Amino acid sequence: MPSDRLPESGRLPETGRPAAELLAELAGLRDADLPVRGGQVTAYVYDTGREAVHDLAATAYQEMLEVNCLDPTAFPSIVALERRIVGAVAGKLGGGSGIFTSGGTESIMLAVKAARDARPVEGRPQIVLPTTAHPAFHKAAHYLGLEVVHVPVDDAFRADPAATAAALTPRTVLMVASAPSYPQGVMDPVPEIAALAASAGVPCHVDACVGGWVLPWLRDAGRDVPPFDLSVPGVTSLSCDLHKYGYSPKGASVVLFADESLRRHAYFASAEWPGYTVINAGVQSSKSAGPLGAAWATLMAVGARGYRELAESAMGAAERLAAGVAGIPGLRVLGEPAAPLVAVASSDPALDVFVVADEARARGWFFQPQLSYQGIPPNLHFTLTGVSDVDALLAALADAVKAARAAGPPDVPSELVDALAGLDLDSLDDAGFAGLLASVGVDLAGGAEPEMAMVNAILDALPPATREALLIRFLSALYA
């Protein structure tokens, strides 16, 4: 390597490198990434299949790249764009006022903060969640000092209103429902849960991060979509990600509040220093307006007709996938998805879904593994979009199932699971933990794609707290 190159150790080149060379290196680094277009990655990315829209969003992002959202009085363009975006979202989701955020986690964080600050209680505040609620609520509770109270879901994976009512205490500051929940794509009974919240005088948040910008368009297209938005009595806030089925570049979400006073509780201001005035609507202070510009451009370019078409296409793909899964021996769909999200589990002990995921990855497809939890079996998650080639997906799935059945489930030594459950992780540094991973087939330094079936099988055999501890160490070792 030439002496002026930037090695992984972080040493800067003495003189700046040519732009073409740097861009070529970035392209080389991306060679190992999953593809973001084409529909073979059934999680994380959303593709309209409309190149002109993607190109426009990139240009709009660049136009706003250096604008700082820290001070709306210095850059009034951010106020104008945010008003337009929030207004468009509110217009489809029952009204209210809102905040443009960097993603669903920040939207949820602000909703939890607003509820906590609007409803002071004696002792540690509590948030009541169905077990299928997104971990962003756990993250918000962890950061903001709340206690999570879990309520079970029924056999259809929907939140149980009776269990929710039983979980309420004088310390409850927020109740949550999902529209839909991510793991199985099913709708919680939002009106019932919101009514319970209203009768108790407790705010109710609807997590529509994944469904908020596809469900209303499906309703417009004539499908039966249960009530879920701010028009439902008792719903006080709602989150909707535009970088999911809004197809905007990442960094685009909206949190809506039915009452503007509740929205103000999401804000943060500080005058306890001699510097510039600090007032933030979101968690971040300085941030690029690039996502804001790209989201607005995407919404305007796609338009209402485009979103109806994309929603119908995605939902049709999900329905064709579910029907096709029924024809593959050993597989079954969990629940009845109300949005283009499908969870597929094994109905055959000889067929392991984690092995299926590895076999699919070897064939150029990414199927997202989901671990078992409270009686919900391990499964594969599929997020379908308008470009999803269901015939090709089903062929790849059937081929992966055939190979996985021949390979058999991972042989997980029980002593290894016991050893990991009792392992003192604090006694290992990152290098020692990386060595432990290598012993079960995950080489962080080798560059090869790991076979994750064994790793997922081991994690699946461990309790959630141990899974969390191991995953934190994995991330630390990965970036070490």
Image (cartoon, rainbow, N blue to C red):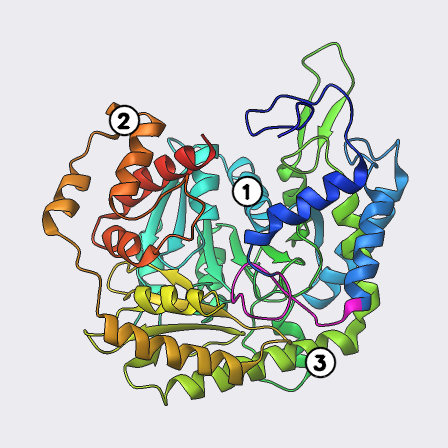
Residue marked by disc 1: 109
Name the residue tied to disc 2: 428
Marks 1 and 3: CB-CB under 8 Å? no
Is residue 325 visible from the viewing direction of this image?
yes
Which numbered disc covers residue 195? none
Q: At 22% from the left edge and 61% from the top edge, which residue is drawn? A: 410
Q: Is residue 142 left or right of residue 21?
A: left
Q: Hey, which quadrant is residue 84 in on the image?
A: bottom right
Looking at the rendering, the stretch of residues picked out in magenta corresponds to 36-51
**Residue 5 rendering spot, x and y as whole percentages:** 67, 28
Label 1 to label 3: alpha-carbon separation: 32 Å
Residue 335 visible within the image: no
Residue 469: % across, % down: 31, 37
The kind of residue tagged 2 is Leu
Q: Is 38 inside the magenta-drawn segment?
A: yes
Horizontally, residue 252 falls left or right of residue 84, namely left
Of 431 and 1, nearer the camera is 1
Q: Secondary structure at mark 2?
A: loop
Would residue 120 appear left or right of 91 to someone viewing this image? left
Q: Residues within 10 Å of mark 2 (few under 14, many from 20)?
A: some
Instruction: Quarter of the image for the C terminus: give it.
Output: top left
Residue that carries the numbered disc 3 in the rendered image? 309
**Closer to the camera: disc 1 or disc 3?**
3
Nearest the viewer among 192 and 351 is 351
Q: Is the residue 317 above or below the residue 440 in the image?
A: below
Nearest to N terminus: mark 3 or mark 2: 3
User: Regarding mark 1 in the picture, which secondary structure is present there?
Assistant: helix
